[in-house]
Amino acid sequence: MSNEIMSELRKDLIYNLMIKGEREDGRKFDEYREIKIDTNVIEKAEGSARVQLGDTHVVVGVKIQTGTPFPDTPDKGVIMTNLELLPLASPMFESGPPREDAVELARVVDRGIRESESIDLSKLCITPGEKVWMVFIDVHVLDDGGNIMDAASLGAIAALMTAKLPAKRFDVGEDTPLPMRDVPVAVTAVEIGGTIMLDPSLNEQRIAGAKLTVISNQDGGISGMQKSGVNPLTTEQINYIVDAAIEKAKELRVKFLEI
Amino acid sequence: MAKPEKLIENGIRLDGRKPDELRPIKIKVGVLNRADGSCYFEFGANKVIAAVYGPREVHPRHMQKSTSAVVRYKYNMASFSVEDRKRPGPDRRSIEVSKVSREALEPVIFQEYFPRSAIDIFVEVLQADAGTRTAGINAASIALADAGIPMKSLVSACAVGKVDDTLVLDLNKDEDNYGQADMPVAMTPDGKITLLQMDGHLSSDEFKEGLEMAKKGCLAIAQLQRAALLEKYSSQIVGESNE
Amino acid sequence: MKMEKKIVIPGDFLSDDVKLADEGTYIEDGKVFSSVFGIVSLNKQIKVVPLSGKYMPKRDDIVIGVVTEVSFSNWIVDIRSPYEGLLHISEFPRRIDNAEMSKYLNVADSIMALVSDVDESMKVELTLNDQRLRQIKDGRVIEVTPSKVPRLIGKNGSMISMLKNETGCNIFIAQNGRVWLTGKDKNMDLAIRTIQKIENESHISGLTERIIKFLKEEKGIPEKKQVKKTEEDKSGGILDELLDK
């Protein structure tokens, strides 16, 4: 839609602050904005969470239903992650088929959940070859204040951690919590003029040369990575970000997911 | 749930309401940062959020009108808003709801003040329990005011239905599923009707009575919409200026 | 002068006297109603000042814009409105060739321009041909709600003069709700915080006193200096102006 152009003046401001070791909103380079997570906000869904990360606001709904498994994994449940960059959230988002950013965000969030094996898919099997649980994770972005990735990933995990398998409704037993065995947390960093900053604000995201998301597990292992943006990153920068991300993920896990 | 035997017993509905009672409403104005105006609206178990962008440049350009703004309304239901997960994207129902909702609001907007521009209204249903289109219109009215869009007045909406041969105000999901008629209505505070749809069967007398019931409901909602807008700023207003 | 500050919503009844109807109102059936969500001011005319809303360009307004495109003979400028501004090459203060345009003014550059004309289809023409106007190459530009610009300027410029004096910054407020500040970083920070406070509380009475108090607190002026300043101002007239409101 409207091509929002950031003035040179504003870019200069961000660069000048960065040289002094400061950010527009007064944060340190490795500091996150204020985070608020509420769960069970959509009672009718099997799991849900609302995340406010600075000015970014997302709602995640988890719907769980029975279905037929994929033929090559007859005894495993199915997870599907979708993300909508709703036109509500920004003058830059249009309605229509998902843009590449929405698809990328959804796939990276999904990868974090899947590769960490945070959900043991074999525990989602009801009758092998016939009936399994299908877990749909839908992220709805309501307000884009930058770093949707981390907000979406926190929301997805919080929603999954409080989700229930609706066994009663589908006549397959009693309701039980969705079995989760890890808590992957995404941490995103951007590179601006050679400096690495975590949890980019909207303006920082827009002028960043490169962006790197690292998803790590409780044991400090990495279960997903994604670099985006047109600038290259050096090995040093990448290693720095990976270490910072694992540290920060531990902090976020304790503070907000109480793990 | 399987069809209950009775939807009304001794004048009390399944959820404890009397026939002319609205479900509880909760409203919060200006909940989004990027949108020019916004409103979060709960109507019973319905949870909707409305955002307004505008007036702003029209894209694609060829859609612009030379002497007035073009008003666009997009109603969308989140996949997780309903019992059985819904596939993302518009379906025929949401296209119809978008159209009638836009037509419910257009008559009050001073579109001619903004030639060659667009006023975009987005309504997202986060949780549905019958009456999402009326919740959407109520939220959208507030969001338009919050965005500073000049209007003749707000628009208020609610639905009337018939269950067990009794007219009731503001159907919930079960009443909608198992009832005999569903009639959403939107109107301005001075009584002009801007939305009217009916699904089911009503006698001509029932219709007239139902419409009066809907009008009363809409007026009650108009009071709440007004209070919600004033509340955004009222906590600080001290009274007359001493300057 | 006592002014009533009441908040109204679209459709609220204001008066039976249609002769008094001014901005932010409409007339129907011989009565005046509010057309926006805003504050009623019942001076000589009945006006409703909206609490939010976009900037609508008017001839002779000074605006701060950002160049979004360089076309063959026009710079296209974002003036924070549903309507873009067009700066024709002939309205640049120097004679330059079409090919040189981006050399002088390029995409993302900020300018302070004058709205020279607006036609009925809202085609907005800008000019830089005036000594008040210029390119903005330093300092900071922040945004406020356009309808609050008069409050920020104050009666006879009293609010903005006070801000400039108390913070030692140069501050220019454009009609389209963009504010340009220059000065020392610390002073600009204080000015910006103060402007944000004015924006958030513009609808609450007693604003001027609160702002004066805020500035004094933020600057941490000890007692002695405060007294001295008042004496100076008595001869200068700023506080007098404000207190006379």
Image: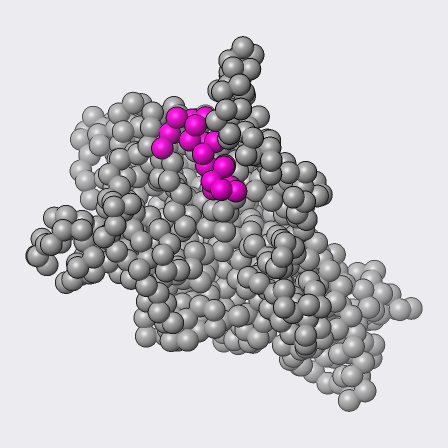
Figure quadrant of residue B69: bottom left
Instruction: Estimate the x, y position of residue C110 in percent, counting from the top left.
Output: 27, 45
Residue in front for this viewpoint, A39 or C108: C108
Tell which residue pokes out farthest to the front in this image: C235
In this rendering, the answer to whether C92 lies above or below B208 is above
Question: A253 or C210, which is in the foreground?
Answer: C210
Q: Which residues are magenta?
A: C153-170
Could you tell me if residue B71 is visible in this image? no
Image height of A17 relative to B90, above or below: above
One can see residue C147 in this view: yes
Inspect the magenta stretch and tell me whether residue B52 lies in it.
no
Quarter holding the N terminus of chain C? top right
Q: Relative to A140, is A26 above or below?
A: above
Q: Nearer the viewer, residue B57 or C120?
A: C120
Left or right relative to B217: residue C37: left
Q: Main secondary structure of the magenta part?
A: helix
- Image vertical order of residue C10 relative to residue C80, above or below: below
The stretch drawn in magenta includes residue C165? yes
Q: Point out residue A25 in the picture as x, y percentages from the top left corner.
A: 41, 32
Q: Which residue occupies 91% across, 68% down?
A: B10
